[in-house]
Image (spheres, rainbow, N blue to C red):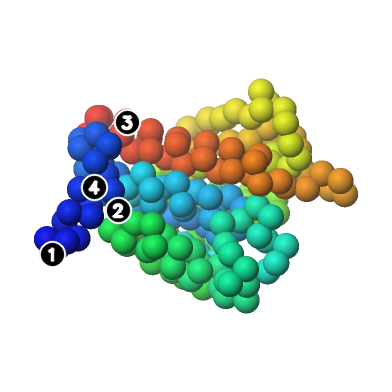
Amino acid sequence: MTEASDRLYRELFSQHDPSLLKIWQAATIGIAGCGGLGSNIALSLCRAGIGQLILADFDIVTVPNLNRQQFTLAQVGQYKAEAMRDNLAAINPFCSVTVHLAKINSDNVETLFGECDILMEALDGAEQKQMLIETWLNLHPERPLIGASGIAGYGNNELIHVVKSDNLYICGDEISEPEPGLSPLAPRVAIVANLQANLCLELLVKRNKTV
């Protein structure tokens, strides 16, 4: 690390607790999907000081994505995972980001995310979500998966919560689903995504204290 980069690092994380930053810097977090949830999760974990992120998404950025996903007009047409990597590098160049332009299935979960300490589920569709949950917890029952269910609409903050079952955590209201007139809106999507990210940081600290 050069003198300039060392100074940038110290300034960037000057308000972080050094003992917590050390834990987060050592962590590898997987994010399955880089849409509304995934792009918000990635930004928050990058800003918090997570050392390595592994992003997997085969989709491209479209104009309708911009109403809730952390991309810009200039990135329309780019692969979401690659665009997200560029955005993260512009915020925190000390976060190592690995990108996989792949559709996630039960056969490649281990290849994509096998080295991750925690896996963040940010996929569309109940079947995809269930596949990832079942596959991950079968492969790594000792490692947490943090998912989301119920993010559509607006308001009703009091309904958003976390449900835990062993190493499976689900954030959201578990009720609201996208339908005509009830789409995922940026504030609620970001609330749930940041609840996932915040829980991720907490679990990493708790794990370190029990080691």
Q: Residue at x 69, y 35 (%)?
A: 174
Three-letter code for the amino acid on which mark 2 is drawn:
Gly
**Residue 105 position by quadrant:** bottom right
**Structural distance between the alpha carbons of marks 4 and 3:** 26 Å
Q: Choose mark 4 or mark 3, whichever is in front.
A: 4
Q: Residue furthest top?
A: 158
Of the numbered discs 4 and 3, the one sitting upstream in the chain is: 4
Q: Residue at x 22, y 52 (%)?
A: 9
**To which quarter of the image does residue 65 belong?**
bottom right
What residue does disc 3 label?
206
Look at discs 2 and 4 and give the one toward the viewer.
4
Residue drawn 66% across the image and 27% down it: 157
Mark closest to the chain's N terminus, 4 or 1: 1
Badge 1 crowding class, 10 Å Cα cut-off, few under 14, some 14 to 19, many 20 or more, is few
Q: Which callout, 3 or 2, points to the residue nearer the camera?
A: 2
Q: Within 10 angstroms of label 3, few (less than 14), some, or many (20 or more) residues? A: few
Judging by the rendered image, the residue that carries numbered circle 2 is 51
How far, Cα to Cα, is label 3 from label 2?
17 Å
- State the separation of the CA atoms marked 2 and 4: 16 Å
| Three-letter residue code for mark 1 | Thr
Q: 10 Å neighbourhood of mark 2: few (<14), some, or many (≥20)? A: many
Residue 177 visible in the snapshot: yes
Tell me whether the residue at label 2 lies in contact with that at label 1, contact meaning CB atoms closer than 8 angstroms. Answer: no
Residue identifier under label 1:
2
Label 4 sits on residue: 11
Helix, strand or loop at mark 1: loop
Foreground: disc 2 or disc 1: 1
Image x and y of residue 156, in percent: 72, 27
Which callout, 2 or 4, points at the residue further toward the start of the chain?
Answer: 4
